[in-house]
Amino acid sequence: MGKNKLERFEENLTFPNLFQVSYEFLQQNTFHLRGKWNTDFFKNDNPIVLELGCGKGEYTVNLAKKYPNKNFIGIDIKGARLWRGCKTSNEDKMTNVAFLRTRIQLIEQFFAQNEVSEIWITFPDPQLKKPNKRLTCERFLSYYKNIAKTNTVIHLKTDSYELYDYTLNEVIPQGNYKVLFNTDDLYSSDFQDDVKSVRTFYEQMFLNEGKKITYLQFLLN
């Protein structure tokens, strides 16, 4: 393990808005903020927005800057990546940002029913050979349903046409989800929203390679 990564892991321990909880702990204990994010951490009643597989937390941080009346939580298993979002949000003294280091399949351990209002899934691993591991498969959507408010908006932004097509033409019809917007070439579309205002590290890399970015927005019934 590189020295830089070790230093980031050490600094992660000092960030008051980063929560790292082991699977073993969750087997025996309830996460202390589950159902209490608004009252005990953010100290307001503003909507909670998640970025799943957030990496460096580009959407988490940038949307939090743009919308101070919303609370944003980035979730990823890679601590070295989370460091960047934690570092920026703490240096900028942001009070509507938090990060969780955990696996997405454990999300119900951290949030209670009706606690989440919006979910961003930005450039996840498309899991081309393992459909049941895709973050938009019905298995994962069932996890989200157990923590989401009625008609929570899901945003999927990806360079993987396969994941986009799978979600749009297989998952959504089977679940009878309502599509709000979809495009297989975002930057050639006339869509104007936050989906264009923030570009992740990987997104810019894909765009530089000439890849098309797909975007799908739907309601989680």
Image (cartoon, grey):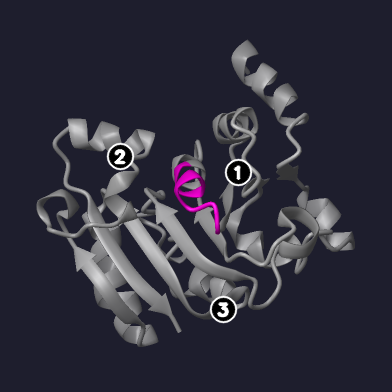
Residue 77's label in the rendered image is: 1
Q: Which residues are magenta?
A: 62-69
| Relative depth, front residue between 126 and 128 | 126
Q: Is residue 114 above or below residue 197?
A: below
Disc with the residue nearer the chain's start (2 vs 1): 1
Q: Position of residue 39 (x, y in %)?
A: 77, 63
Q: Nearer the viewer, mark 2 or mark 3?
A: 3
Q: Label 3: few (<14), some or many (≥20) within 10 Å?
A: some
Q: CA distance from mark 2 to mark 1?
A: 19 Å
Looking at the image, residue 174 sits to the left or right of residue 9; the answer is left
Q: Quadrant of the N terminus?
A: top right
- Picture residue at 58% right of the left edge, 37% below the top: 78
- Label 3: which secondary element: strand
Whether residue 88 can be seen here: yes
Q: Amino acid at mark 1?
A: Ile
Which circle's residue, 3 or 1, is located before the other in the chain?
1
**For residue 153, side relative to residue 215 (left or right):** right
At a point 55% along the width and 58% down the height, the residue shown is 69
SS type, badge 1: loop
Image point 51% across, 48% down: which residue?
A: 64
Label 2 crowd (10 A; few <14 / some 14-19 / many >=20):
some
First along the sequence among labels 2 and 3: 3
- The percent position of residue 184, horizontal first and vertical second, equals 16, 59
> Neighbour class for label 1 at 10 Å: few (<14), some, many (≥20)?
some
Which label lies toward us, 2 or 1? 2
Inspect this view and state whether residue 158 appears.
no
